[in-house]
Image (cartoon, rainbow, N blue to C red):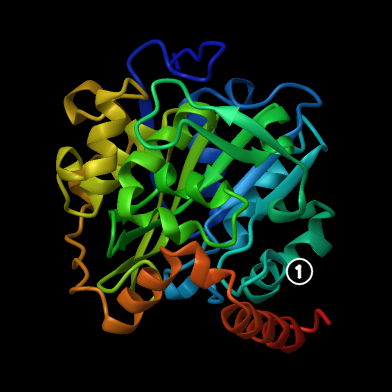
Amino acid sequence: MLDTIDNEGFTLSKPYVAIIEGINPHQMIKDAFNLLGGLDFVVSSQDSVLIKPNLCALKESDTGATTDPMLVEALINLLRDKTSDISIVESDSGAIDAEVKFAACGYVQLSQRTGVNLINLSKEKLVDVTIPNALALKSIKLPKMVMDSDVLINVPKLKVNEITGVTLSLKNVFGLMPSRFKTKYHRVIDKVIVDLNKVVKSRLALVDGIVGMEGQGPIDGDPVKMNLIVTGSNCVAVDSISASIMGFNPEAVSHIKLANSEGLGEGKLKNISIKGKNISEVQRKFKMPRSMPLTRRIKFKIIEYDALLTSPVISECIGILRYYRRWKHGLT
């Protein structure tokens, strides 16, 4: 039996996580769902489904930075047995529009092949969401379509992160925030991640470990060929297993530990049932990032000050860079 999901989207019994090794994303997705009990636990007939990949950079998936569109396509093909209401979502970040991310990372072609919509959440209607027992954010504006959707499928990348240690499904929810300058929350990032996951529930976490990233992640690290996916219905459990596969103690990863202590899921490996491969069969010690480069530290420091971000000079520079990137990817 798969773990039961309550009305709030949290598991009620011991969570199951599937570890699948292979070279064919379509077969890997099928094998994962077979191990977890089929599609019914994820999606019902005619549900509205949002798929959130990790598109944090203008890089293809074989760099280890972004989610493989072939894996997302395999997921879409399987979901279509249940529903045709499927969209892929992403938000703007810094001087990069979501449309540019879709173009650079292979998702425009995916949309053309499958007919799914590509949605820029930064352009969607927002609603005020109150966060219960908040650690950092008492309330937040989030896209209405995220809060109204029947199913959110969270498809992050298996990689390290110079700020949060690892970046997996819990961290990927951060990318649903519509603000262009999400990095202003980095000072309290672990608490913000947990707060967001209290109100945004992923029905399925599906970690793309086909090619992961070690070293200077989440953008400038080195690719690691793993040929894996890790999936389950609870982000905390999936991230705990994924972190362990990367050679890290999940209880030492601040946001995973905090999510576990806040009751968002199971973070202790002994309390998680594993299907498919064992951790020891696929585990590889990922290299951690060196200290953050000076240029990135300066950028984050600037972003912490809203007054600077809204200054005419900074706004003009961001606008020029946004236009150039849109032009480069044929979006002007």
Q: Position of residue 117 (x, y in %)?
A: 80, 52
Residue 121 seen in the figure? yes
Q: Which residue is mark 1?
A: 109
In the displayed structure, 174 sits above or below 65; it is above
The count of marks equals: 1
Q: Quadrant of residue 58?
A: bottom right
Q: Is residue 180 above or below residue 207?
A: below
Amino acid type of disc 1? Gln
Residue 48 relative to residue 313: left or right: right
Location of residue 159 (image quadrant): bottom left
User: Residue at image x 70%, y 73%?
Assistant: 103
Q: Residue at x 27, y 27 (%)?
A: 260
- The residue at the point 60 percent across, 29 percent down is 129
Image-quadrant location for residue 161: bottom left
Q: Position of residue 196 (x, y in %)?
A: 47, 36
Quarter of the image where the C terminus is located: bottom right
Q: Residue at x 60, y 48 (%)?
A: 52
Q: Which residue is at the front of the view, 21 or 318? A: 318
Residue 231 lies left or right of residue 263; in this view the side is: right
Residue 212: where, in percent of width, then height? 37, 64
- Residue 18 seen by the camera: no
**Which element type, helix, strand or loop, lies under badge 1?**
helix
Judge by depth and name the residue closer to the eye, 29 or 97: 97
How far across and down, in percent of the image, does residue 141 sit?
Answer: 62, 40
Q: Nearer the viewer, residue 3 or 152?
A: 152
> Badge 1, how many Cα within 10 Å: few under 14, some, many 20+?
few
User: Quick one: quadrant of the N terminus?
Assistant: top left
